[in-house]
Image: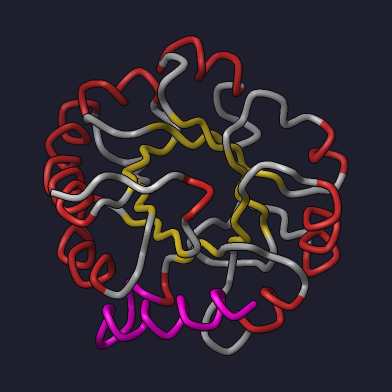
């Protein structure tokens, strides 16, 4: 079992649903450093059960395991922290539940929201539109550039990023990226992760 890396050292972040557990292991082998379990459809008990293979794989590879939007289940899922969106619990509310030692991430979709990130350990900065999160408001590469200029905590560009556009996202200043389909839907998730990781590491 490896020691988990720090959120600031991660470059590639993968978001999956519970049914995608089979993707976790090859993605981690390919260089994913953070895996988030985001599944709005599961009950609390189902989510705790689904978290098991995610947690075990992340522990084995020294990766971080983050739960989406359910701070009250972080302890039961043995997650390293929680990620909240603009319409979820606030960072302060999430922190009060998960405690000072856990990671709290926050989604940002506009430049104005960069002014209200106090208490977050990292950000997910929405770049392009994506069918996996239809309610998100993509900020485009201008938001990536604004985050690069202003944000001092770790952050990941997210939303519609794949091998075709990751280089421009990196060139705009993103220190890391978060993806869903680019790895989940690949014929070979390990190879896909490795390719994305290589590009963002060069950026």
Residue 28, position as x, y percentages in the image:
26, 65
Q: Nearer the viewer, residue 68 or 119?
A: 119
Single out the residue that lies furthest toward the front.
3
Picture quadrant where residue 91 is located = top right
Residue 115, position as x, y percentages in the image:
84, 34
Q: Nearer the viewer, residue 16 or 40?
A: 16
The vertical placement of 92 against 116, above or below, is: above
Q: Residue at x 74, y 67 (%)?
A: 173
Single out the residue that lies furthest toward the top.
96
The vertical placement of 158 against 71, above or below, is: below
Residue 15, position as x, y percentages in the image:
40, 56
Picture quadrant where residue 71 is located = top left
Q: Is residue 190 magenta?
A: yes
Q: Residue at x 78, y 58 (%)?
A: 148
The vertical placement of 140 against 164, above or below, is: above
Q: Residue at x 19, y 40 (%)?
A: 51
Picture quadrant where residue 197 is located = bottom left
Q: Residue at x 53, y 56 (%)?
A: 133
Q: Is residue 172 magenta?
A: no
The vertical placement of 186 against 20, above or below, is: below
Q: Give the position of the C terminus as an image quadrant.
A: bottom right
- Magenta region, main secondary structure: helix
Residue 119, position as x, y percentages in the image:
64, 23
Q: Which contiguous range is marked in magenta?
A: 183-203
Q: Nearer the viewer, residue 124 or 47?
A: 124
Q: Nearer the viewer, residue 161 or 177?
A: 177
């Amino acid at each position: 079992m490896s020691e988990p890396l720090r959120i600031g050292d991660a470059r590639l972040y993968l978001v999956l649903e519970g049914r995608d557990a089979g993707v976790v292991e090859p993605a981690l082998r390919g260089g994913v450093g953070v895996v988030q379990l985001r599944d709005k459809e599961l009950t609390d008990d189902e989510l705790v059960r689904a978290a098991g293979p995610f947690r075990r794989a992340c522990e084995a590879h020294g990766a971080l395991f983050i739960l989406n939007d359910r701070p009250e289940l972080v302890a039961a899922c043995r997650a390293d922290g929680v990620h909240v969106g603009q319409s979820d619990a606030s960072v302060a509310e999430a922190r009060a539940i998960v405690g000072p030692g856990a990671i709290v991430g926050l989604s940002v979709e506009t430049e104005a929201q960069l002014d209200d990130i106090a208490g977050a350990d990292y950000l997910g900065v929405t770049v392009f539109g994506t069918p996996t999160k239809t309610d998100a408001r993509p900020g485009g590469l201008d938001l990536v550039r604004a985050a690069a200029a202003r944000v001092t905590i770790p952050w990941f560009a997210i939303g519609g990023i794949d091998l075709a556009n990751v280089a421009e996202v990196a060139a705009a200043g993103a220190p890391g990226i978060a993806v869903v389909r680019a790895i989940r839907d690949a014929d070979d998730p390990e190879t896909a992760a490795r390719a994305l990781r290589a590009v963002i590491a060069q950026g």
